[in-house]
Structures are given as structure tokens and as C-alpha cells.
Amino acid sequence: FNNFVRIEPIVSENPRQQPIVPSWSTVQYNKRPIINTPWMKDTQNVAMTTVNNINGAMLELSDTDIQRETAKANLILVQRMGDLVLAEKDKVKSEMSRVQIDSERMVSERDRNLMESQKLEMEKELYEAKLLSGTP
């Protein structure tokens, strides 16, 4: 009997410092979804974060917290949509400028072709005149 170390139960004045005797309820309470662990949070995409937020809400958030989170999520969503719209706008703008440049290029090409054909016409007339006059 004396070979064993006797362990005294820890007693403290502050009841909150008492060690918690594990029971089924504490095990269940301490079990958090894996999604909520910070290292998972870092590595997961938006969908999982959303799930995680919902889980968090189920576990430990008050109504105001949930409302705040929802508002935040909605704000982010609106911002993302705004970004998308702006990107689309930029795309349309660049497309329009490209079309304008194309049309200007076509106009200048048409003018050049017109001048070319006029030149050819003049050369032809000159040639015909030479033929008619018989000069070498």
C-alpha cells in the first residue's frame, strides 16, 4: 500500500478552477465540427466558409451576431456583383474601342484603295493617249 503515490484531489476556493470531470455531456459540448478549426478555415473556399458560418451560428452566435454576419455576407456578395458588373463594363468599353479602331482602319483602307484605283485610271488614260498619238 505504501508503494503507491497518493494523489490528493485538487481543491480550490474558486469553484470555476475545479477540474471538470469528463462526462458524456462535456464530451458532446466540447466536440466542435472540424470545419470550425482555424487551420481548416484558412484552407477552405467560400462555400465551406459559408457552411462554417452557419455552423458557428448554430453553435455559439446570438441573434444579433447572426444578423451581423448575414449583413456582412450580403455586403460582400453585393460588392462581388459590383466588381463583376464593372469588369463587364470595361470589357464592353474595350470591345467598343476595338470596333471603332477597326472601322477607322477600314475607312482609311477604302480611301487608299480609292486613290489607288484613281491612279490606275489616270495611268490607263495616259497610256491610251500615248497609243492614240503614236508617240513612243
Image (cartoon, rainbow, N blue to C red):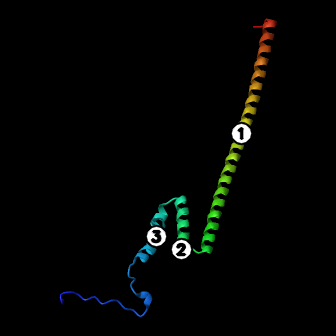
* Residue type, numbered disc 2: Glu
119 or 86: nearer the eye? 86
Bin the neighbour count of mark 1 within 10 Å (Cα to Cα): few under 14, some 14-19, many 20 and up.
Answer: few
Position of residue 135 relative to residue 96, above or below, is above
Tell me, for residue 39, which label it has, or none: none
Q: Determine crowd level at label 3: few under 14, some 14-19, many 20+ residues with C-alpha closer than 10 A.
A: few
Residue that mark 2 sits on = 60
Callout 2: helix, strand or loop? helix
- Which label's residue is closer to the chain start, 1 or 2? 2
Task: Give the vertical position of 4 relative to 71 (above or below).
Answer: below
* Mark 2 crowdedness (10 Å alpha carbons): few <14, some 14-19, many ≥20: few
The quadrant of the picture occupied by the N terminus is: bottom left
Three-letter code, disc 1: Val
**Residue 112, percent across and down?**
74, 28
Q: How many marks on residues?
A: 3
Structural distance between the alpha carbons of marks 1 and 2: 56 Å
User: Decide: marks 1, 2 in contact (CB < 8 A)?
Assistant: no
Q: Which element is circle 3 on? A: loop
- Residue closest to the eye, 44 or 31: 31
Residue named by callout 1: 99
Position of the C terminus, as image quadrant, is top right
Give the residue number, with chain letter if any, for mark 3: 32
- Going 79% across and 5% down the picture, which residue do you hit? 134
Tag 2 and tag 3, C-beta contact below 8 Å = no
Residue at the image position 80 percent from the left and 14 percent from the top: 125
